[in-house]
Image (cartoon, helix red, strand yellow):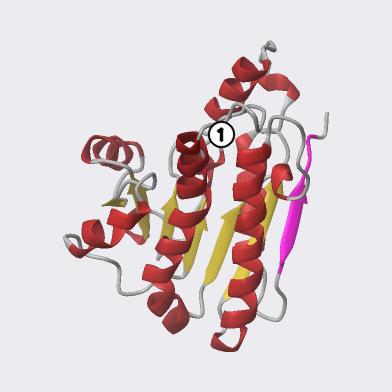
Amino acid sequence: MFVSAGGGGGAGGAAPAGAPGGGPYRVLHARDAGRAKELAAEFDGARTLVGDLADPDKLSWAFSHQSLPDRVDSLLHIAGVVDLGPVGDLTPKSWRHQLNVNLIAPAELTRHFLPQLRVAQGHVIFVNSGAGLNAHADWSAYAASKHGLKALADSLRHEEHTNGVRVTSVYPGRTASPMQAKVHQQEGKEYDPARWIDPESVATAILMALDLPRDAEVNDLTVRPGR
């Protein structure tokens, strides 16, 4: 069973399409019932799980009213939000929103699915960012959330190694996606998707890590634009 948080645009749309098993063996997370309906129509046969990543305190309550899969072979954290700005201008609301979606919600989702992942000796994929390795001006809140995501993945890897759970962080460079269009708008730059990584390429890297034989594990994978 393949569970994806972020089954929308960019790599979040490409990865579920190539997921192992496919169809009824996919569970796609959605922020609300309307989005769940759209995902179910887009990915034929896939199940959906509804919960707002922007409010991770309520995920446990939301999941208690839904049926979680008994087995999880892979859990993909792909969802993310970005709001650029200098430290002097960013409000606590902006900080909380990015930390909630990009860091706290992945930790909470992982907590809920760890029992199933342990049984299956499954694989957790955190789609991070180049900002999770380096921080630049105006990227403080987003980079902080992504540096935290790296720490979460590294700690989880050490904690779950004896349980047979593999953990991989993927660090894509700029990828053609709705998020990248928003970044360019915030930067005041013209957006040309042809300049950046195709989401299918990021999805291919993710699936490569998932398909690796059990005698090896990809801990960290950096993907950069080839153009």
Task: Residue 129 in the image: state x and y as whole percent.
Answer: 67, 45
Magenta stretch, residue numbers = 218-225
Q: Is residue 124 magenta?
A: no
Residue 152 placement, left or right of 115: right
- Residue pictured at 70% horizontal, 33% vertical: 174
Residue 152 placement, left or right of 9: right
Q: Residue furthest bottom?
A: 162
Q: Amino acid at mark 1?
A: Val
Using the image as rendered, state which of residue 196 and residue 153 is in the foreground: 153
- Residue pictured at 47% horizontal, 43% vertical: 96
Q: Residues within 10 Å of mark 1 (few under 14, many from 20)?
A: many
> Residue 51, relative to residue 176: is it above or below?
below
Q: Is residue 222 magenta?
A: yes
Using the image as rendered, state which of residue 148 and residue 87 is in the foreground: 87
Task: Residue 219 in the image: state x and y as whole percent.
Answer: 71, 67
Using the image as rendered, state which of residue 199 and residue 50 is in the foreground: 50
Residue 180 placement, left or right of 54: right
Instruction: For residue 17, say whether it is visible.
Output: no
Name the secondary structure under disc 1. Answer: loop
> Residue 163, relative to residue 176: is it above or below?
below
- Residue pictured at 57% horizontal, 60% vertical: 125
Instruction: For residue 227, say whether it is visible.
Output: yes
Q: Residue furthest front?
A: 88
- Residue pictured at 75% horizontal, 31% vertical: 137
Task: Residue 175 in the image: state x and y as whole percent.
Answer: 66, 33
Which residue is label 1 attached to?
82
Residue 33 placement, left or right of 21: left
Task: Residue 186 in the image: state x and y as whole percent.
Answer: 61, 19
Quarter of the image for residue 35 reads top left
